[in-house]
Amino acid sequence: MMVCAATFLALGTTGGVPYPAISGPVAFAVLVTGVVASGLAVVAQTWAQQKMSASRAGLVLAAEPALALLFAVVLVGERLDLLQLLGALVLMVAIVGHEIAFTGGAA
């Protein structure tokens, strides 16, 4: 993240990429939002990973792309094409299959 920020800052200051002017309050709001959102996400993820097995944590993190697609469709109204749907289904079936095999069918 820091490498991207440094790269875009360098490109923006050399005239390589035109950026709109950002006022002080907007820059502060973007900074606070980024730090708080990223910080809370890392703290929540770390806390949750401590409460579950490594295998289960890996499966939860593997489901992130499918869950992001689901939230994009439900909350933002993104259009879902067949390839995206099939990819999400394959991923979720693999995760559920692993959980069933890993727990022996017990919930």
Image (cartoon, rainbow, N blue to C red):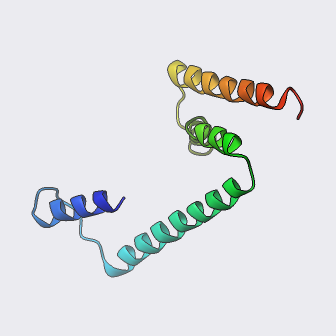
Instruction: Using the rendered view, name the quadrant where residue 14 is placed.
Output: bottom left
Considering depth in this image, is 29 or 95 the residue closer to the camera?
95
Q: Which quarter of the image is occupied by the C terminus?
A: top right
The N terminus, quarter of image: bottom left
Q: Nearer the viewer, residue 57 or 90?
A: 57
In the displayed structure image, the side of residue 91 where residue 78 appears, left or right? left
Viewer-nearest residue: 78 or 41? 41
Compared with 49, 101 (above or below) is: above
Left or right, 4 with respect to 62, comes to left
Total numbered labels placed on residues in the image: 0
Q: Position of residue 11 (x, y in %)?
A: 16, 59
Residue 30, compared with residue 93, is above or below; it is below
Measured as percent of width and height from the top left, residue 80 is found at 54, 28
- Of the pair 3 and 18, the residue shown nearer to us: 3
Q: Left or right of 14: which side holds 76?
A: right
Q: Residue at x 16, y 56 (%)?
A: 17
Q: Is residue 92 above or below residue 74?
A: above
Which residue is situated farthest in the right direction here? 106
The location of residue 5, given as percent across then percent down, is 30, 62
Q: Residue at x 29, y 57 (%)?
A: 4
Percent x, y for residue 8?
A: 23, 59
